[in-house]
Image: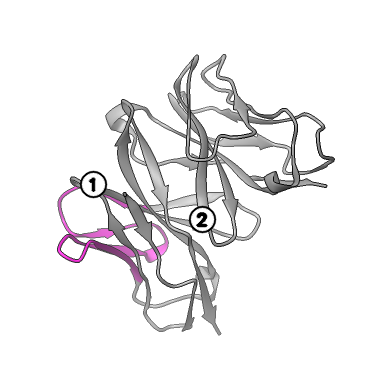
Amino acid sequence: AQSVAQPEDQVNVAEGNPLTVKCTYSVSGNPYLFWYVQYPNRGLQFLLKYITGDNLVKGSYGFEAEFNKSQTSFHLKKPSALVSDSALYFCAVRVPTSGTYKYIFGTGTRLKVLA
Amino acid sequence: EAQVTQNPRYLITVTGKKLTVTCSQNMNHEYMSWYRQDPGLGLRQIYYSMNVEVTDKGDVPEGYKVSRKEKRNFPLILESPSPNQTSLYFCASSQGGHRNYGYTFGSGTRLTVV
């Protein structure tokens, strides 16, 4: 079955330290991968996507993600965390279905950046 | 401003009382979808629509209905809500077909069924 896993419910990191939020996937074919962020009482906002090309993709707010085909991973990273990065992060993969596409989301990882 | 607008933001209702959550997008997107978000389960797709008058079930369609009479609107209907439909609901839209490179989400509707 096609799936996305975010193995950590919560990640704590000190402000100024690098952060990583993990995501692994299980899909057939070449995956289209996405990261979204959800701030309290808000909808999900698009951060970045991997479609093809360079394995390191850069997105909004200084975030980047590294696509690793052999490890089927798409970890979200940021060199220096900010308190304002504290939010809920979702990884998603686009898969074909019934003449269109659907998105499978992970269960989310809550990031807490401590001052 | 390009956006997806959901209403209401918060709703408390009683079991069995029909309700509709509206969703409208101003980006001329073909594809629209409804999700529910529950703790520990992430986002699960309820229904989606590839275009006007074309809708299909997602992963958790039971107890829900949708319609797509116009391109911009995609309401979610709960004919007889039950407490297990208490959840946070999101509408999302995107371009269709191969140009479907990610969603724009609405701000969410927190529904409580008592």
Chain ID, mark 1: A
Q: Is mark 1 on a helix, strand or loop?
A: loop
Give the labeled residue for mark 1.
A51
- Depth check, mark 1 against mark 2: the one in front is 2
Q: Which of B16 and A88 is in front in this view?
A: B16
> Which quadrant of the structure image shows residue B74?
top right
> Which quadrant of the structure image shows residue B95?
top left
Q: Please, is residue B23 above or below residue B90 in the view?
A: above
**Residue positioned 58% across, 23% down in the render:** B73
Q: Tell me residue A67's x, y (percent).
A: 22, 61
**Residue positioned 30% across, 58% down in the render:** A25
Is A67 included in the stretch rendered in magenta?
yes
**Residue B107 visible here:** no
Q: Please, is residue A110 above or below residue A58 in the view?
A: below
Q: Using residue A88 as the reference point, say whether residue A59 is left or right of it.
A: left
**Residue positioned 44% across, 76% down in the render:** A81
Q: Tell me residue A17's x, y (percent).
A: 40, 84
> Which quadrant of the structure image shows residue B16?
top right
Q: What stretch is highlighted in magenta?
A: A48-77
Quarter in which the C terminus of chain A is drawn: bottom right
Chain ID, mark 2: B
Mark 2 is on which residue type? Gly
Q: What element carries label 2?
A: strand
Give the labeled residue for mark 2.
B42
